[in-house]
């Protein structure tokens, strides 16, 4: 498969014209666009499809490089949220030169950073951005994250919550449940739920070691987590910890397991909660799951999924037999594991260093390299067919928590562009339907800032 980079020089000119028209008059909310009732697809990342529009984070900014005065509203265009109208098939529209058409700036604030993410529920965008407020000692704390909301046209910006400790992308989610929006964070081991409808903030538990966050479209109202034992447990146990859950709308802890074993909540997927478990008196930690979509946790069958614990794994859809399947990366191999009690249940589907990204259908997406000089690849776990998504050792930005995103049509990732001012990163995309073709086109999404216009195509 040959990758062809779509033309970018017409976009360079368009980007300079767009920014030149911004002026100092302040941000003006857009007109037109999707309606609040239009379907949103892909919440929690750097792209969301809302109706016939693609909302996307244009570029990436390293939060550690920010200084006082940076990230003020309406002074950031590069790593901001933009939108563009899609065609009738849901595809990005390009002009004759291969450049994206008709982009509009929606949120003029940094959203593309190490832990950036945004969501669209109803008529609102919910997004994270580096904190701009000082701490009690007067220090800038750009490592803190602030949550905001705004209308689909960028108007009526509201600050919702600031996590006053450094948290990672995998330590928060924003959910819609019973027509209300909730922010769930794990801040320095403290699990919090923020109800944005009444601004109430509830601390659920402290010394939390893991939260099984669900994707937005699988969330059923319960949050599963593991925590250390505390004085209120009235336990004489010397070892182990607590596995518990809380209802997001009526926050209070419900203890599910407290038996001397040690649990670490990992994720919620396919109607099941996944967790690592070292049994009381045991020496090994293994991955388990329980079906909870239709059955209470304590009455559901506990299924052991691995003989060891994996730091890098992806849960597959339900597989026939006694086990849900998983994809795991370990010891320079990618495994498909469907039955730990059978030799046929372990299959090596790729050999080499790999960092897992996501699965779609029978394809497993991953990258090799250090996250900056890397190759995005995919392997079919049934046929073992292997394909490169990007050129070998491409200049990408994958060594961050917001590595990559995808929707039903495209994969999105940050690509490096270089000129005499240095290196900058902008969102690129590859269409799923083009993968496997003799020539696959990789396209820039969005607009360059004038100071970042590359001297040569990369």
Image (tube, rainbow, N blue to C red):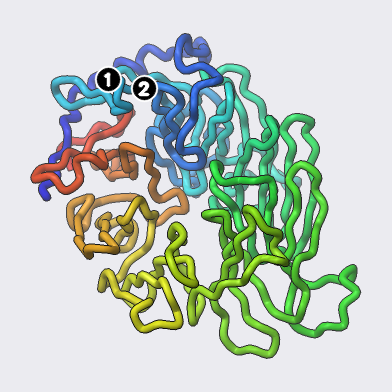
Residue 278's spot in the image, x, y percent?
A: 63, 81
- Asked where in the image residue 77 lies, by quadrant, the reply is top left
> For this view, does 455 lie left or right of residue 66?
left
For the C terminus, which image quadrant?
top left
Could you say whether the residue bearing mark 2 is in a helix, strand or loop?
strand
Query: Which mark, by number, is residue 384?
Result: none
Residue 288's spot in the image, x, y percent?
A: 56, 71
Distance CA(mark 1)–CA(mark 2):
7 Å
The reply to whether residue 217 is in sight is yes
Could you say whether the residue bearing mark 1 is in a helix, strand or loop?
loop
Q: Is residue 257 above or below residue 394?
A: below
Q: Is residue 206 above or below residue 405?
A: below
Marks 1/2 in contact by CB < 8 Å: the verdict is: yes
> For this view, does 427 lie left or right of residue 375?
right
Residue occupied by mark 1: 101
- Asked where in the image residue 95 lies, by quadrant, the reply is top left
Disc 2: CA contacts within 10 A as few (<14), some (14-19) or many (>=20): many
The reply to whether residue 450 is in sight is no
Give the mark nearest the N terminus, 1 or 2.
2
Disc 1: CA contacts within 10 A as few (<14), some (14-19) or many (>=20): some
Outermost residue, front side: 321
Residue 255's spot in the image, x, y percent?
A: 79, 64
Residue occupied by mark 2: 84
Residue at x 46%, y 10% (from the top left corner):
32
- Asked where in the image residue 411 lies, by quadrant, the reply is top left
Residue at x 58%, y 49% (from the top left corner):
143
Residue 314's spot in the image, x, y percent?
A: 44, 62
């Amino acid at each position: 498969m040959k990758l062809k980079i779509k033309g970018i020089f017409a976009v360079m000119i368009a980007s300079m014209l767009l920014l030149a028209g911004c002026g100092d008059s302040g941000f003006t909310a857009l007109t037109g666009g999707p309606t609040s009732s239009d379907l949103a697809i892909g919440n929690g990342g750097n792209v969301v499809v809302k109706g016939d529009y693609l909302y996307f984070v244009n570029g990436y900014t390293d939060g550690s490089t920010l200084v006082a005065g940076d990230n003020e509203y309406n002074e950031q265009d590069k790593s901001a949220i933009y939108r563009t109208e899609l065609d009738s098939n849901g595809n990005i529209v390009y002009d004759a030169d291969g450049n994206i058409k008709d982009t509009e700036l929606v949120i003029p604030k940094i959203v593309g950073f190490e832990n950036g993410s945004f969501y669209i529920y109803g008529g609102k965008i919910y997004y994270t951005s580096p904190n701009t407020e000082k701490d009690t000692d007067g220090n800038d704390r750009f490592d803190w994250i602030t949550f905001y909301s705004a209308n689909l046209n960028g108007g009526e910006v509201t600050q919702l919550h600031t996590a006053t400790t450094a948290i990672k992308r995998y330590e928060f989610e924003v959910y819609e449940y019973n027509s209300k929006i909730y922010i769930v964070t794990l801040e320095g081991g403290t699990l919090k739920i923020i109800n944005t409808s009444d601004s109430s903030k509830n601390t659920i538990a402290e010394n939390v070691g893991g939260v099984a966050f669900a994707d937005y479209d699988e969330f059923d109202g319960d949050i599963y987590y593991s925590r250390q034992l505390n004085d209120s447990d009235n336990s004489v146990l010397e070892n182990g910890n607590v596995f518990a859950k809380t209802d997001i709308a009526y926050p209070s802890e419900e203890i599910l397991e407290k038996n001397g074993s040690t649990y670490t909540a990992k994720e919620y997927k396919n109607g099941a909660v996944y967790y690592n478990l070292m049994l009381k008196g045991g020496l090994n930690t293994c991955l388990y799951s329980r079906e909870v979509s239709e059955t209470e946790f304590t009455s559901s069958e506990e299924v052991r999924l691995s003989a060891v614990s994996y730091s890098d794994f992806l849960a597959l859809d339900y597989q026939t037999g006694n086990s849900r399947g998983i994809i795991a990366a370990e010891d320079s191999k990618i495994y498909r594991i469907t039955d730990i009690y059978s030799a046929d249940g372990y299959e090596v589907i790729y050999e080499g260093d790999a960092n897992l990204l996501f699965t779609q259908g029978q394809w497993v997406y991953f990258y090799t390299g250090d996250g900056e000089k890397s190759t995005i690849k995919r392997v079919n776990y049934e046929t073992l067919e292997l394909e490169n998504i990007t050129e070998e050792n491409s200049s990408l930005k994958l060594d961050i928590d917001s590595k990559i995103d995808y929707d039903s049509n495209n994969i999105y990732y940050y690509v490096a562009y270089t000129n005499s001012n240095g290196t900058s990163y902008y969102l690129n995309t590859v269409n799923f339907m083009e993968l496997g073709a003799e020539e696959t086109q990789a396209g820039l999404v969005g607009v360059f800032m004038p100071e970042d216009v590359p001297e040569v195509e990369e």
